[in-house]
Amino acid sequence: MPNVAPSSSAPLSVAQTIHTACERHPALAPLIEHFSELYSIRAELIASLAEQLAKDTNCPVPVINEEKLQHGVPVLSDSNATWAASCYPKLKETVFVHLKNISSLESSITLFEQAIDTQQLSLESLFDALLNSNESMLQAQAKKANIEYAVFIFISQQMLSCLLSAYVHVHKETVQNIFWREAYCPVCGSFPDISILQRPDADQSEFLAGGGGKKMLHCSTCSHQWHFRRGTCPACNNDEAGAIHYFHVDGNTGERVEYCNSCNTYLNNIDLRNTTATPDLSVAPLTLIHLDMQAAQKQLTPLVRTLWNTF
Ligand SMILES: [Zn+2]
Ligand SMILES: [Zn+2]
């Protein structure tokens, strides 16, 4: 790439984020590249679905109910995802085709598709179960589809993540200013897969007051971002002074593991304050595998399990 610093206003694409990470950590490149195709396919699908949903008159604007939000109930907890049906064919043609090429998943994806096609499994009830973490309902659905539970959850999460990311992208104006104090997503209820310290110029008043960036959490499912208190543990809400500890790897101060001494849970963090390039945040957690490895060695538990952080 030419020696021109990317503009801070333009985030890197998925491919650029992966490329930069592989250059920075050549030893991890094979591992990162192993998942990169899935992320590129997902990013294309999400952009295409967002375009489709923006024109879809059956795709409702999320209903913001202040009282429910105050009680920590996410926006989509009781919504009816009828709009998801129109997205399913594109998901099948892209992400599912890719996953079928992974031999261990081929038969399960086929069974999943059959269950939807024969209406043994409805997208609406699946969304309902996922958004409300209704485990007994999910177990019953996996059994009906004849798919091993863990694999069923993986496939369902991939689907939910693509569709909700598109939905949230279309409705970002509606959801971006929700007032929320929880560590799980105000839109879909999932926990974050990364936190970000924003550049000071993103919030000048906070910069002047404390010299630091605002901490945002990035949803592991729908990619929504929300503000969270910097000194609080997102897993156990411990907010005593010094609750959050951190360490860097290889002297790279732009990336770190933040963990709680009380519950031993960690969440990786990207500090954007001394950088000009903003990574694509959906794939950024994948580029921090080296942090996950160190955290595993220190016997820390990830806040959310990903494809690669369970060693
Ligand atoms: Zn979310
Ligand atoms: Zn904790």
Image: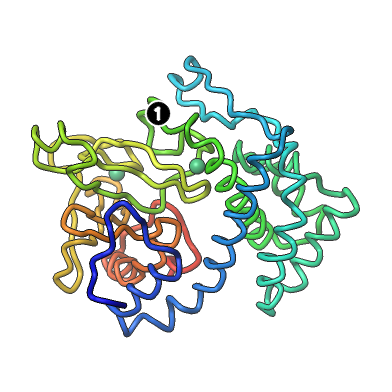
Query: With 83 as the anchor, is 17 left or right in this view?
Result: left
Element marked by disc 1:
loop
In the rendered image of this protein, does residue 67 appear above or below residue 286? above
Indicate yes or no: mark 1 CB to ligand 1 under 8 Å: no
Regarding ligand 2, which quadrant of the image does it lie in?
top left
Q: Which residue is mark 1?
A: 177
Is 262 positioned to the left or the right of 110 in the image? left
Q: Is residue 14 left or right of residue 48?
A: left
Horizontal and vertical percent position of residue 116? 83, 53
Front residue of 176/66: it is 176
Q: Position of residue 249 (x, y in %)?
A: 20, 70
Q: How is the image coloured?
A: rainbow
Q: Nearer the viewer, residue 113 or 283?
A: 283
Q: Position of residue 12 (x, y in %)?
A: 38, 62
Q: Residues within 10 Å of mark 1 (few under 14, many from 20)?
A: few
Up-down relation of residue 26 to residue 287 (above or below): below
User: Which residue is most to the top?
Assistant: 67
Q: Please give the name of the residue rendered at 54% of the width and 60% of the height, measured from the top-left corner.
A: 43
Find residue 102 and report its image quarter.
bottom right
- In depth, the one of 143 and 126 nearer the eye is 126
Residue sitting at 75 percent across and 67 percent down?
108
Figure check: 211 above or below 286: above
Q: Work out whether 136 lies above or below 70.
A: below
Amino acid found under the numbered disc labelled 1: Asn
